[in-house]
Image (spheres, grey):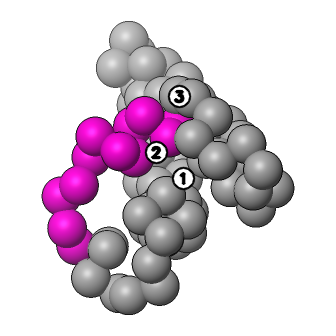
Amino acid sequence: MTSKTILLIVLFIWGIPSSFIRSKFRKIVYQTNHWTINIKPLFIKEIIALFSNMFPENSDYIKTRNYYRIYLLIYLVIFIIYYNS
């Protein structure tokens, strides 16, 4: 196997938990537990919440937001390495 194939597999495997992390984050941001939040394309508030401090008093939001940021950063690094290889 080539290094590009291995990186593609790593990228795919790393992407699997993204739906769970994003779902948890979106439920906090949009303040709902309804399952439809996962399929609605509501991006603006989510992006603002990711790069700002929308709920400074909510420790679960801050913890989830920081975890999601780190997750996305690692995902970006893997993608850049894959793209440049």
Q: How crowded is mark 3: few (under 14 residues within 10 Å), some or many (20 or more)?
A: few
The range drawn in magenta is 39-50
Q: What is the three-letter code of the residue carrying label 3?
A: Phe
Q: In this view, does 81 lie to the left or right of 69?
A: left
Question: Please, is residue 48 above or below residue 29 in the view?
Answer: above
Q: How far apart are marks 3 and 1 (CA)?
A: 22 Å
- Badge 3 marks a residue whose secondary structure is helix
Mark 2 or 3: in front is 3
Q: How far apart are marks 2 and 3 (CA)?
A: 23 Å
Q: Is residue 18 left or right of residue 63?
A: left
Instruction: Identify the mark nearer the N-term, 3 or 1.
Output: 1
Q: Which residue is drawn at 40% across and 46% down?
A: 46
**Image label count:** 3
Q: Name the residue under label 2.
A: 11
Q: Mark 3 points at which residue?
A: 51
Q: What is the three-letter code of the residue carrying label 2?
A: Leu
Dots 2, 1 in contact, CB < 8 A = yes
Q: Name the residue under label 1.
A: 14
Q: Distance between the residues labelled 2 and 1?
A: 5 Å
**Front residue of 57 and 22:** 57
Residue 80's image quarter?
top left
- Badge 2 marks a residue whose secondary structure is helix
Dots 2, 3 in contact, CB < 8 A = no
Q: What is the three-letter code of the residue carrying label 1?
A: Trp
Question: Please, is residue 30 above or below residue 68 in the view?
Answer: below
**Front residue of 84 and 29:** 29
